[in-house]
Image (cartoon, rainbow, N blue to C red):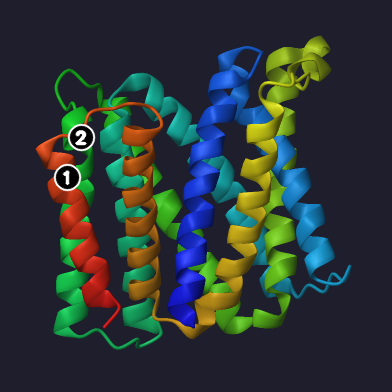
Amino acid sequence: MNFIYIGLIILLYSFQTLFCKLFSDRYPGKKELVSPVFCVIQAVFITFATFAFNGFQFHVSSLTLLFGISNGLILFGYNTSLIKAGTLGSYAFLNVCLLYGAILVPSAYGILFLHENITVLKIIGIIMMLIACVFMNMDEIKLKDNSIKYYIFCILLFLFNGAYCTIIKMQTIYFNEEKQSMVMITFSLMGIIALINLITKEKGSTLQAFKLNKKCLPSLTLCLISATLAINLLMYILPLIDTAVLYTVQNGGVLILSALYSVFLFKEKMSWQKTFGILIAVISITILSI
């Protein structure tokens, strides 16, 4: 049953990525405003939807408040680093960095502090997934002529994404009954920071940035629904599965579906490197599912 849940999480997060891209492409305003506008809307939607999922209850301890605030700041740092790195160099390489962070950092925490069982087979599966990430992005990776700032932001992406996933895991371990409250705090704070950032940039024309058209609304709505269901389902299943297995399978599965979306929906070519990467990722998921 757990792997059915993981399959749903993979599907939902892949939908979130897909529809977020479609929203970004169809956003009618300035392209540099896509990220803060999306963050504010996402924060409002996920906060209130999670509040409803939790029976309109909000209980928070000091530790949950700390986790929520930390992850809210980390989310803002992640989004900022993603934008900065994306403007300075290869998107494919930064994608590998953030995926490595999501797999390695929480996995190390689970093994070192939660004493999660790590077998040789699991290690092989994780290594294969890390290799698959590189192959699936190899066609677009460009490491020449990048500035030092680019690599600094890529390192920050690795750390931010890893820290975000780790704190979510910590919440489910120490205060699982308050996990929805932590999600609400995280996204509320992230939304507030994004709104302040937007107001600073636009000043008198902030409301203009939120004027959306019929072309981008469907993709935005589907993205928000997918993201809300994904984060709440993830919080439910996290205490039930080893961190190393869950995050590796989840991120690998999303990577596979994203690669397939790019080929069938965006007409990108399927190179031998991408095909080989998908094959390795599938084998990795199979090994970790045993």
Residue at 30% x, 78% y is 289
Q: Nearer the viewer, residue 243 or 88?
A: 243
- Residue 267: image x %, image y %? 33, 26
Query: What amino acid does circle 2 point to?
Result: Met
Identify the element where label 2 is drawn. loop
- Which percent across, then down, holds residue 286? 24, 72
Amino acid at circle 1: Thr
- Where 287 sits versus 261, above or below? below
Q: Is residue 220 left or right of residue 249?
A: right
Residue 155 seen anywhere in this rendered image of the structure? no
What number is the disc on residue 270?
2
Do the residues bearing badges 2 and 1 touch, measured as CB atoms within 8 Å?
A: yes
Choose the circle earlier in sequence order: 2 or 1.
2
User: Which mark is on residue 275?
Assistant: 1
- Displayed quadrant of residue 70: bottom right
* Residue found at x 52% / y 82%: 239
